[in-house]
Amino acid sequence: MKRIALLGSTGSIGRQSLQVIDTLQDRFSISGLAAGGNLDELTGQVLRHRPKLVSVGTAEGATELCARLRAAGHTPLPEILYGQQGIERVATDPEANMVISAAVGVVGLLATYKAIEMGKPVALANKEVMVAAGEIVSAAARRAGVDILPIDSEHSAIHQCLRSGERPELKRLVLTASGGPFRKTPLSKMKNVTPEQALAHPNWKMGQRITIDSATLTNKGFEVIEARWLFDARPDQIDVVIHPQSTVHSMVEFVDGSVVAQLGPPDMRIPIQYALTYPTRLPANGFSLDWTRMRLDFEEVPAKKFPCLELARHALREGGALPCALNAADEIAVAAFLERRLAFAEIPQVIERVLERMPGTRFERIEDVLEADAEARRLAREEAGRRETAVS
């Protein structure tokens, strides 16, 4: 029985992870859950999975969760923690055999890093871990001799495709992008995009930030950076193509011209289960492709329409603090757009200005990442505020 520590249990990936674990109860159980402020969802998860450790965002949330569990007659009560210390306790619990890192933002970065240092394999859905601190985190994984198994459908696909060859045989990685809701929208109309339009993803049901990042293709830039560290690939070995059907999740081209692709329905439970059961594959009821209705189209990414992808490539080439700043600036800009304080076309403008202003320091410690993240957020708020003032 493998014991799982789940960071970000009430988010989309967290909930789907628990669905997968529910179908494999003879193989997995929950040692700890870490969440933010969604106590309605978390209470039900605790009652069902009976973890030993639970962490929430605040002390007030911990008190309320305790009261809810008592009222439900749940005994014995788990140890209820909160804040950064709480999520780290869940991640580093000695009884946990594996960590699912699905907490949104840098809140899960330090906890994931400490779990890796303790020798725990990680099923990774938190983009910030590898985008903001990929070099440091991948080095820690090598020292500890542990796997970082990607949950993102694109990186899971690459992980599976790479099992078809040896590393010296690799020519390039090809990440596929759906193109989001604006694949066919003329560039001239992009400046008037509303949050409702940007959140209407044609293929995937995801959280708000990642859905907006899909609309700007920033998420694909993040994935390029992640792939660099997850698979030890050079930046010039990582390409992106638009594939609107989201059936081919990504591809690997080998030096002899062979291309291996991973196909599957657009359901995140498939890569979640792959990460949890690796290197074994287990049956998954209900997942299958309808080959009689399949169509596969591929297009180049229009650079002028999606400038965030090139900004991410620039951050990767420059290295140091810039990938971290890219992530932080995007988070602030997306939040401002969703609050209607920033135009859609201004999201890349904020990111670009933050990258220009951010000191290009190199990271020596994981704490350096947190400091750079805080500075980039400050700069991004300043840039977003300046544009908001200009508009008003």
Image (cartoon, grey):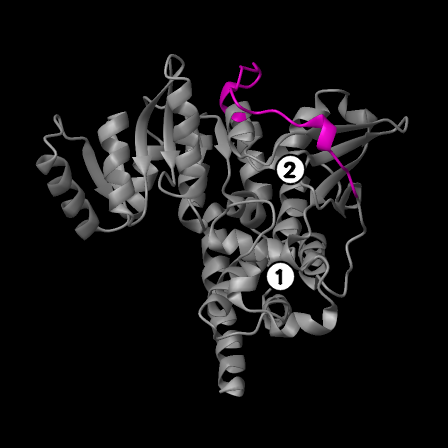
Q: Which residues are magenta?
A: 275-297
| Apparent side of residue 388 relative to residue 265 in the rendered image (left or right) | left
Q: Residue at x 27, y 40 (%)?
A: 42
Q: CA distance from mark 1 to mark 2?
A: 29 Å
Q: Residue at x 65, y 46 (%)?
A: 225
Front position among marks 1 and 2:
2
Residue 204 x, y percent position in the rendering:
56, 44
Q: Earlier in the sequence, mark 1 or mark 2?
A: 2
Instruction: Answer whether residue 350 is magenta in the image.
Output: no
| Apparent side of residue 278 relative to residue 159 in the rendered image (left or right) | left
The answer to whether residue 4 shows anywhere in this view is yes
Residue 89 x, y percent position in the rendering:
30, 35
- Residue identifier under label 1: 360
Q: Determine the residue located farthest toward the right in the rendered image.
A: 256
Instruction: Answer whether residue 296 is magenta in the image.
Output: yes
**Is residue 350 positioned above or below 149 on the image?**
below
Q: Which quarter of the image is occupied by the N terminus?
A: top left
Please identify the quarter of the rendering in which residue 151 is found: top right
Q: Residue at x 26, y 27 (%)?
A: 48
- What secondary structure prevails in the magenta region? loop
The one nearer the camera, 309 or 301, is 301
Please identify the quarter of the rendering in which residue 147 is found: top right
| Apparent side of residue 37 relative to residue 306 in the rendered image (left or right) | left
